[in-house]
Image (spheres, rainbow, N blue to C red):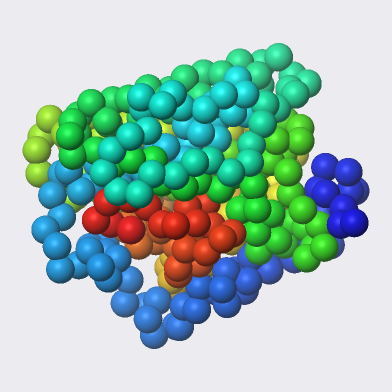
Amino acid sequence: MSKSFHDTQIDMSKVDLQAGRRAFLKSAGLMAAGAATLGLANLPVDAEAQQINDSVILNFALNLEYLEAEFYLVAAFGRRLAAANITGAGTPGGVQGGRKVTFATPLIQQYANEIANDEEAHVKFLRAALGSARVARPLINLSTSFTAAARAAGLITANQTFDAFANETNFLLAAFIFEDVGVTAYKGAARLLQNKDVLEAAAGLLAVEAYHAGEIRTILASRGLFMQAQAISNARDSLDGATDLDQGIGTAARVNIVPTDANGLAYSRTPQQVLNIVYLGANASAASFFPRRLNGSVR
């Protein structure tokens, strides 16, 4: 029987921080020439020929909020989104894996509760804004996806599994996989939005995701999980092509809670870059967070 992450002592001095970059690049099949063509306006192939309007972008965001809401709700409260909040266009799906985390630190439990409530509110807000155009919750994988991500990052070996819900440390590392992606996704989508009211709402969503990301990054740093966070960051960054967008949380000597460029600005990710991360490769698979892809035009 393979060992799980939470009952295995790992010598982090031996973790290959570049393993994630190599593994993800291999699984995604990204060639250097192709990666170099990624630009700010790059979109998935089957979306390029379509008109990218505000509804399309909000539905793309709704898919990501479904994922975050389901992760935090089950971890904090042991429940899912209500049936009334998951219907819509596209192929509906359930949620694989996940359970309530036994938190050892009351304050971290409170953080998890607050983020879970925020993410559920985001789902409800976007669904209300989209009305009849909203997409259904697609199939979400909260089980094998975390193991695939941890193996690709070099946090565990090919014979180990990563249980994101085993303890609060695993929960925090799993949350780190999502949070920075949400910030950069909203930042990248801002230039595509046309309605100023929608843009203002998206700015509000981005701000909350940034608060969440800063919260998770701060807790990880306070626990000295610098190498683990860097390994996850490297794995995410490998899907961004030739660019180097992602940043870890620094070191004990110099923390990096707020990842910015030289101008002090948050980075942007294109929809395709976001998809590569949540699919853990160029295409969806059984190990992806969305095994049957997202619902909507951008998928």
Q: Which residue is drawn at 25% across and 68% down?
A: 46
Q: Which residue is drawn at 35% across and 49% down?
A: 91
Q: Is residue 243 visible?
A: yes
Tally of marks: 0
* Location of residue 274 (image quadrant): bottom left
Name the side, left or right, on which 24 lies relative to 48. right
Q: Residue at x 70, y 35 (%)?
A: 165
* Location of residue 11 (image quadrant): bottom right
Q: Residue at x 37, y 33 (%)?
A: 86
Name the side, left or right, on which 107 lies relative to 262. right
Residue 93 location (% of width, % of height) = 44, 44
| Image quadrant containing the C terminus | bottom left
Residue 74 location (% of width, % of height) = 59, 28
Q: Does residue 201 lie above or below 272 as drawn?
A: above
Q: Which of 201 and 47 is in front in this view?
A: 47
Q: Does residue 278 lie above or below 203 as drawn?
A: below
